[in-house]
Image (tube, helix red, strand yellow):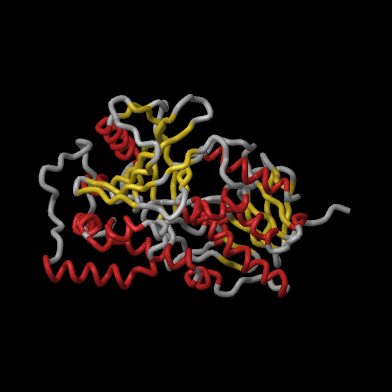
Amino acid sequence: MTRAARIGIVGAGPGGTALALALTDRGVDPRDVVLYDKARFPRGKLCGGGVTFRGTQLLDRWIGPLEGGLVTDALEFRSALGSLPVKERGPQRVYDRGLLDHALVETCRRRGIEVREECAISAVEPGPGRWRLVHRGGVESHRWTIGADGANGLCRRASGLPGGLTGRLVEAVYEPVSASPRPDTLIFDFDPILDGIPGYAWVFPYVSPDHDGVLYKIGVMDGRGRVPGDVLRRWTDAFAERCGYRRLDARIAGWPERYFDVGVRGARPGLLLVGEALGIDALLGEGIAPALWISEYAAGRLRSALDAGVDRVEGYEQGLLWSEEGRNLWFQARLADRLYGPNPRRWLRVLFGMPHLHALAAGGQDAYGRLVHHVPWLVAGHAWTVLRHGLPSDGPVPGWQPTVAERPSME
């Protein structure tokens, strides 16, 4: 008789595979876990592919450095107001998502976890005591269903649970023409804010499996989901041209992202949401590292529920908020509220003008997205700056020229 898996994970991206691996780390029998995904691996996947040190820690445990990726040693926040170099505590990596996802899936297989490729789930339905997964092969149910199928996936929609803001990202691959490429640095540019886009642009080095040499992924995030996609695409092309890059992709693709905040909910009896289905970093849209850490947390809570023989995880969201990653995701959401909120230019001036933050970024003792324990010191530094120099202006930046002719409204 075939053993029935107790845990069905919908989505075999970083969130789903990390949960499967973290469960087996905790002694769960691999035969009790099955991963479903509509794709066949390796697959193409839209994503900047950058993994900061907060994520490489976990990836090193499961797969280590992968051939075909890049190791970078710096972050740089920049805008027309200046530059904020950030020295990370450890390595950052940039991967083609097809390569990364395939490596995680193969690691799951080596551990004996079943991976069902090309198995699209067409419906997720609540049933008596269990959730039903409908696919072309029939209907299955597991003691626990895990939604790791993305920001607007079936599990998130079927759960009926409140989620965070949903934004939009667009991206394409470019080659340098007149640019001075920096393959060792992840660049985050906040000039979109000056054009009325509540988000940032990125320039990430990229090694394509189909191209020799280093290319660059360039895109822009709308962190509030307010700007039409065609405006974001025009902005991206204009920004890339201004920086000295030429687009190679035939089109600029886009996808939605859901951002983590305190109002997000991710648990119902027999169902947990992880990864992008629960929420990602609201400030920079970093998804891979938070997905890994959320799954690491969820695995511990799920193992406890399995041991107790219960079908619910009480305080799932509150427990996450007390964890290191949860506290930092909360802090990132607070920063996003300010930079992408009603007075964005004022907070942009704070970001690039606070000596305490510059000193912290240059110290190399912390990782990006792990700053919540510095909040009292940063608040005190901001208060001292305001007392000495007054509140920064929210007025226009002198000399700034719009990147595109049509400027979206921040209202």
Q: Could you tell whether 360 is left or right of 306 in the image?
A: left
Q: Position of residue 400 (x, y in %)?
A: 15, 43
Q: In the picture shown, does residue 118 fall above or below 338? A: above
Q: Locate residue 201 relative to residue 66 in the image: left or right.
A: left
Residue 6, position in %: x, y? 74, 60
Quarter of the image where one finds residue 204: top left
Q: Is residue 133 above or below residue 400?
A: below
405 lies above or below 159: above
Q: Residue at x 34, y 52 (%)?
A: 86
- Looking at the picture, tell me which residue is in the foreground, 391 or 212: 212
Answer with left or right where residue 252 lies relative to residue 35.
left
Residue drawn at x 54%, y 64% is: 266
Q: Residue at x 58, y 59 (%)?
A: 295
Residue occupying image coordinates x 48% and y 24%:
212
Mark yes or no: residue 157 visible.
no
Split into 4 quadrants, where in the image is the C terminus? bottom left
Regarding residue 243, the answer to whether it shows in the image is yes
Residue 389 relative to residue 79: left or right: left
How many marks overall? 0
Q: Compare residues 379 and 288 and report the one nearer the observer.
A: 379
Where residue 237 sits: x, y (%)?
31, 32
Observer-nearest of 150 and 377: 377
Q: Position of residue 238 (x, y in %)?
A: 27, 33
